[in-house]
Structure formats: C-alpha cells, structure tokens
Image (cartoon, grey):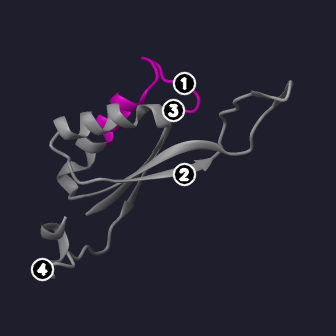
C-alpha cells in the first residue's frame, strides 16, 4: 500500500479529479494548501509589484494498493501539466509507504480497507 500525495495548481483540480475517475480511482482527499517552491508569481498591490511568499495550491491524498500506483501517478501527471513540456509551478507528487489502513466502520484492515 502507498500514499500518493500530489500538490497541484488550483485550476487543475477538476481536470485531475475527472481523469482519476476515468482511471477508476474514486477515493481521494482534497485540501487547500499554500506554499512555494521555484514558482514566483508577481502581483500588483497598491501600484507596487510584490511577490507573495505563499502561493495557493491544492493537495490531493490518495491511498492505493501497489497495482494502482503507476496508474494513479501517470494520470495525475497527464492531467496536471500546463502544457506538453510542463511549467514551473505545475506541482509535485510524493509516494510514501502506507503501513496500515483501517476502515473505521467495519474494522477492515490493509488493502481491503482502501
């Protein structure tokens, strides 16, 4: 089992969600987050150029069994890219081992609970 965490642009959420549904991945958690990496976005505030420290993004968390890792990652990459080559600020994907998953309602554990 793996936990896939993707940080993407806010305007790409619907595209990514729809692409995941098409790939039969329907159980996701979405959070609004902010942060910064290499992306710099200038804004005009009271006539002056400013670069905000934190840029709004969306975080998607998806717990999957091993056989769905590549499908999930490739689907997110394809849907979240700004263009064919990608752009600075398109986001990141993190894959971490998931030690245990427990469905509260039934007490099921492991891959069945996902």
Q: Point out the residue furthest to the top here.
A: 84
Indicate the quadrant where residue 21 lies.
top left
**What residue is at 20 percent from the left and 75 percent from the top?**
103
Residue at x-position 47% and y-position 19%: 85
Q: Which residue is at the front of the view, 51 or 69? A: 51
The answer to whether 37 appears left or right of 53 in the picture is left
Is 75 included in the stretch rendered in magenta?
yes
Residue 106 in percent (x, y) is at 12, 79
| Image marks 4 and 2: residues in contact by CB distance under 8 Å | no
Q: Which segment did they paint magenta?
A: 73-90
Mark 1 or 4: the one toward you:
4
In the depicted structure, whether residue 31 falls above or below residue 40: below
Report how far apart the C-alphas of labels 4 and 2 lie in the structure: 31 Å
Q: Count numbered badges in the picture.
A: 4
> Which quadrant of the figure contains the C terminus?
bottom left
Residue under label 4, please give it: 106
Residue, disc 1 = 87
Residues at marks 1 and 3 touching, judged by CB atoms closer than 8 Å: yes
| Residue 28 screen position, x and y as percent | 29, 53
Q: Is residue 67 left or right of residue 17?
A: left
Residue 61 tag number: none
Residues at marks 4 and 3 touching, judged by CB atoms closer than 8 Å = no
Q: Which residue is mark 3?
A: 90
Circle 4 crowding by C-alpha within 10 Å: few under 14, some 14–19, many from 20: few
Q: Earlier in the sequence, mark 4 or mark 2?
A: 2
Q: CA distance from mark 4 to mark 3?
A: 38 Å
Secondary structure beneath dot 2 equals: strand
Decide: marks 1, 2 in contact (CB < 8 A)?
no
Q: Choose the circle earlier in sequence order: 1 or 2.
A: 2
In what element is the residue under mark 4?
A: loop
> Which residue is found at the position 48% from the left and 37% from the top?
10
Residue position for label 2: 33
């Amino acid at each position: 089992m793996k936990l896939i965490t993707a940080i993407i642009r806010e305007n790409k959420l619907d595209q990514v969600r729809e692409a995941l549904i098409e790939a039969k991945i329907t159980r996701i958690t979405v959070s609004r987050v902010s942060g910064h990496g290499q992306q710099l976005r200038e804004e005009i505030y009271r006539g002056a150029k400013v670069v905000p420290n934190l840029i709004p993004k969306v975080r998607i968390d998806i717990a999957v069994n091993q056989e769905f890792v590549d499908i999930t990652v490739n689907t997110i990459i394809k849907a979240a890219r700004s263009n064919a080559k990608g752009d600075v600020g398109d986001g990141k994907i993190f894959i971490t081992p998931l030690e245990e998953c427990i469905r509260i309602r039934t007490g099921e554990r492991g891959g069945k609970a996902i």
